[in-house]
Amino acid sequence: MDVEAAARAAPPPHTPPPAELRSPGARRADILDYRHHKGHDPPGGTTMPVYEMRAEYDTENGGPAGDSPLRAWHMVEDGAATGLCGRELSPAAAVQAEDVWGTPAAQPFCHSCGALYLRHTA
């Protein structure tokens, strides 16, 4: 294969994200959104998982899931209905962005999901 044919067959070069996304203060969610919409992956070709929090309801002490009190928030990957801890959750349960994790709005939070989330993202 000649040099020109090799250049045409090579994948396009990686384009770095804008400077505001390379700064230490860049929000992880903004970086992931940029990578998703622009088709950029980190070196190695694997994308970072995207997380969100999904509610678990106390159905034993209330009515149907929508009317029951909140038991805990769980961290799930990419809209899944299974918490990182393995608990099966309702696909119709309320969700919050992962940025809310660690704030009062995320309480009560599943301790196991929190530990696994830190292990996955730190």
Image: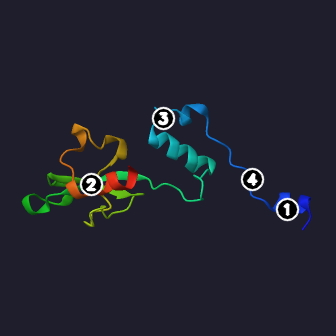
Label 3 – label 4 distance at C-alpha: 25 Å
- In contact (CB < 8 Å): disc 4 and disc 1: no
Earlier in the chain: of badge 3 and badge 1, it is 1
Label 3 – label 1 distance at C-alpha: 36 Å
Earlier in the chain: of badge 4 and badge 1, it is 1
| Helix, strand or loop under label 1 | helix
Task: Please name the residue shown 27% across and 54% down the image.
Answer: 115
| Helix, strand or loop under label 4 | loop
**Amino acid under label 2?**
Ala
Question: Relative to 8, does residue 34 appear above or below in the rendering?
Answer: above
Q: Residues within 10 Å of mark 2 (few under 14, many from 20)?
A: few
- In contact (CB < 8 Å): disc 3 and disc 4: no
Q: Residues within 10 Å of mark 4 (few under 14, many from 20)?
A: few
- Find disc 4 in the rendering and name its residue: 12
| Helix, strand or loop under label 2 | helix
Give the side of residue 68 with respect to residue 40, left or right. left
Q: Residue 49: which numbered mark, if any?
A: none
- Find disc 1 in the rendering and name its residue: 6
**Amino acid under label 1?**
Ala
Q: Residue 26: which numbered mark, if any?
A: 3
Task: Please name the residue shown 51% across and 46% down the image.
Answer: 32
For the question of whether residue 33 can be seen, the reply is yes
Label 1 – label 2 distance at C-alpha: 46 Å
Label 3 – label 2 distance at C-alpha: 23 Å
Q: Residue 29 in the image: x percent, y percent?
A: 45, 43
